[in-house]
Amino acid sequence: MHKKIILFLIISVMNNTAYAQDNIELKIMQSVERQMSLYPKSTLQDLYKHFFQDRFGPGHILSDTSASANYLKKELAKSKRFDGAEYEPTGYLGNFYRVNLSIIKDGKVDFSTFFKAFVRSMEDFKLMPIEEWKIEWKKILNVIALMKLDLPYFKQDCLSIDELLKKGNYVMHHSRIFNDTYELHYRIIEKEIFEKELLPYLNK
């Protein structure tokens, strides 16, 4: 009887693990489909950026707060087009939102409120260790490959991302194709901060 209970528990754990994995793969697929529907000119490089932003947020551009504020002001001043939605979730977990700078330009949120939310988005967020990110990216890449999206420069981008990760880095910018097609101007803001502090202004 004791052996039967143990066997039942093992099977239950295995089934739950398989279900969780299938669920993750489905979420990754849905996230890729969302990105491709919004930005059909995306390359693997752009999909990679979409997923790493979900795990690392805006941390790589927040080392100098004063410089980040000045850069944001200059970007707002010179930008004429603000493509994309006002906000959209990153990756498949949605830890952050890409928040369009148009909400400042249109006067829906003032600069100070926006920038404070942006800076605070990394205060309590725990970054994923790079070794864990390598494993996760491999899973994401496998799902993308199975989707047969016929992405341009797919093999080259695979090699470039692999080289990046081997060097212990994770930051990658949007592809040239993407930047030539879309005029995106946004900042990454943590989900809870955005929904509590900025979203109410957009829902008025």
Image (cartoon, grey):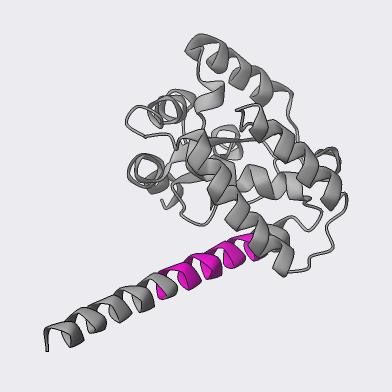
Farthest residue, direction left? 1
| Percent position of residue 151, x then y | 83, 57
Q: Position of residue 102 (x, y in %)?
A: 61, 38
Residue lying at 78% horizontally and 68% vertically, measured from the top left: 148
Residue at figure coordinates x 43%, y 24% from the top left: 119
Above or below, 137 against 40 in this view is: above
The answer, for residue 174, to whether it is visible in the render is no
Q: Which residues are magenta?
A: 19-34
With 45 as the anchor, is 168 left or right in this view? left
Looking at the figure, which quarter contains the N terminus? Answer: bottom left
Q: Nearer the viewer, residue 197 or 15?
A: 15
Which sits in the foreground, 164 or 177? 164
Q: Residue at x 62, y 17 (%)?
A: 71
What percent of the width, then of the height, locates residue 14?
36, 75
Q: Where is residue 2 shown, x and y percent of the image?
A: 12, 83
Q: Residue at x 66, y 61 (%)?
A: 142
* Occupied quadrant, residue 4: bottom left
Instruction: Please tell me which residue lies in front, 133 or 110.
Output: 133
Quarter of the image for residue 126 reads top left
Q: Is residue 31 magenta?
A: yes
Q: Was residue 46 drawn as part of the magenta stretch in this picture?
A: no
Q: Specify whether residue 197 is in view.
A: yes
Q: Main secondary structure of the magenta part?
A: helix
Q: From this view, report whether residue 181 is shown above or below residue 63.
A: below
